[in-house]
Image (cartoon, rainbow, N blue to C red):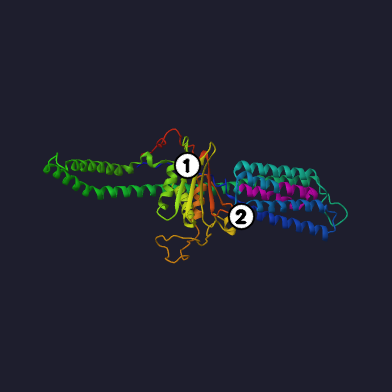
């Protein structure tokens, strides 16, 4: 038994785009509310000489950051590791500033420095977690050495012994290291498990695709073999009965040649199960044509645009996830288009981009920022009847709203990022842009048509 090759596209680690911006914003709003309540309570009810102006400036800066990020990014935006790391670094710096104004390590809220480290350990790569932990240790050390007195309801300043503060600092360091390592270990095991499931899913999808192709080829070869043999026999008998120089002699000869050609085609169909290279790789133009072809039979014109100079065209390994993802986006564009859909591909030394543009009504304002979320549905404005759809306009089933979600996940696993937007007025319609880094295609040389065979293991 031969083991099949590894999944066609390199997997993007789950932490690379695993942190939702919405999650960090909600956590920060929770912190902002808690900090404001604590500061105002101490200032009002304890009559403390608290530098409230500077404290509220620090809290307001976090609120301004949240508002800016909400305005800048859609609700379903996922942060990269550097972006999430920068956000958590800000939280550490802001908390360090507040602690320096309110007693340093004497403040019981100093242990909140653990929160960004814990979040980083569960969602970000090791290198970023080490940076966040190091920043938290630096912040804790600074507030231990340089801080204003702890706000106290009595006029006398509360000064805790240096030995006690040193113990608090050591305890905080141990917590940062121990809890950070433990949380990272648990999250890393979960990430590896999820990546293994994703790899198995794509391998199974590829095997199913090829098995269905092999079965169809074998069935066609078997079913066509008998009538083709009959045609060959009849043609041979006619050739023996009729004169070769007669009016239909050339036709009989041509018929025999075509029968031989059909036999050669059937022989190729029978060999599909051998795993030939043409079914392992495909140029970008072939990928787009395979995705577009099933949708050319409707009353919508599909235009495919490729660079005139095809030198250096990316070649990728066949990936059912990418085929499904692009196919779903093209299908949606055809469903909503009024007359045409334009599919454009271009590539540079660093990126490969596929753009799908339709001339339909475009995306609603309350939907465009949520594209890619599960169970998101809306009614087709203009639909074409397909098998299984209602005969009445506007009564077509919209499904569960998982098509775009699944397509987005498949494309993101291949290393792509996806952007939805509407065309600029007065034009109408939606634009979907799928961008891969060129490194996603670097596993196959562009100077040869097919990849080298993968090593196989005999069992």
Q: Where is residue 121 drawn, in percent x and y?
A: 62, 47
* The stretch drawn in magenta includes residue 119: yes
203 horizontally vs 409: left or right: left
Any mark on residue 306, and which? Answer: 1
75 horizontally vs 307: left or right: right
281 horizontally vs 225: left or right: right
Question: Magenta stretch?
Answer: 92-121
Q: Overall secondary structure of the magenta stretch? A: helix
Q: Which residue is mark 2?
A: 75
CB atoms of marks 2 and 1 within 8 Å: no
Q: Where is residue 358 drawn, in percent x and y?
A: 51, 52
User: Could you say which is closer to the camera, residue 97 or residue 415?
Assistant: 415
Q: Where is residue 166 drawn, in percent x and y?
A: 76, 44
* Residue displayed at 46% across by 46% down: 304
* Residue displayed at 66% across by 56% down: 26
- Res. 427 in view: yes
């Amino acid at each position: 038994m031969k083991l099949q090759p590894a999944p066609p596209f390199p997997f993007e680690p789950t932490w690379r785009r695993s942190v939702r911006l919405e999650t960090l914003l909600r956590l920060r709003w929770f912190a902002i509310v808690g900090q404001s309540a604590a500061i105002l309570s101490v200032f009002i009810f304890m009559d403390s000489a608290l530098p409230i102006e500077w404290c509220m400036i620090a809290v307001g800066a976090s609120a301004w950051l949240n508002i800016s990020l909400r305005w800048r990014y859609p609700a379903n935006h996922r942060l990269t590791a550097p972006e999430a790391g920068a956000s958590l670094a800000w939280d550490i710096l802001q908390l360090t500033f507040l602690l320096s104004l309110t007693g340093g390590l004497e403040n019981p809220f100093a242990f909140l420095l653990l929160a960004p480290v814990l979040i980083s350990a569960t969602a970000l790569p090791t290198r970023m977690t080490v940076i966040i932990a190091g920043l938290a240790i630096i912040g804790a050390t600074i507030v231990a050495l340089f801080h204003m007195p702890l706000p106290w309801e009595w006029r006398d300043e509360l000064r805790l012994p240096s030995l006690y503060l040193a113990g608090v600092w050591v305890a905080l360091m141990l917590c940062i290291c121990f809890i950070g390592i433990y949380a990272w270990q648990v999250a890393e095991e979960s990430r590896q498990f999820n990546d293994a499931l994703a790899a198995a899913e794509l391998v199974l999808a590829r095997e199913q695709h090829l098995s269905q192709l092999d079965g169809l080829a074998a069935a066609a070869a078997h079913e066509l073999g008998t009538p083709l043999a009959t045609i060959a026999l009849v043609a041979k008998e006619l050739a023996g009965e009729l004169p070769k120089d007669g009016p239909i002699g050339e036709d009989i000869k041509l018929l025999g040649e075509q029968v031989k050609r059909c036999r050669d085609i059937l022989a190729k169909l029978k060999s599909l199960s051998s795993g030939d290279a043409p079914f392992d790789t495909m140029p970008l133009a072939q990928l787009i044509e395979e995705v577009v072809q099933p949708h050319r039979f409707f009353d919508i014109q599909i235009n495919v645009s490729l660079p005139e100079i095809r030198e250096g065209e990316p070649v990728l390994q066949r990936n059912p996830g990418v085929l499904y993802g692009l196919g779903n986006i093209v299908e949606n564009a055809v469903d909503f288009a009024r007359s045409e859909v334009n599919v454009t591909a271009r590539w540079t030394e660093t990126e490969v981009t596929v753009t799908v543009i339709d001339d339909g009504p475009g995306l609603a304002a309350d939907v465009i920022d949520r594209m890619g979320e599960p169970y998101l549905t809306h009614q087709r404005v203009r639909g074409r009847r397909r098998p299984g759809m209602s005969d009445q306009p506007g009564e077509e089933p919209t499904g569960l709203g998982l098509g775009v979600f699944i397509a987005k996940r498949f494309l993101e696993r291949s290393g792509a990022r996806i952007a939805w937007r509407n065309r600029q007025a007065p034009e109408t319609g939606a634009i979907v842009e799928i961008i891969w880094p060129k490194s996603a295609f670097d596993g196959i040389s562009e100077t040869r048509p097919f990849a080298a065979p993968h090593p196989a293991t005999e069992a």
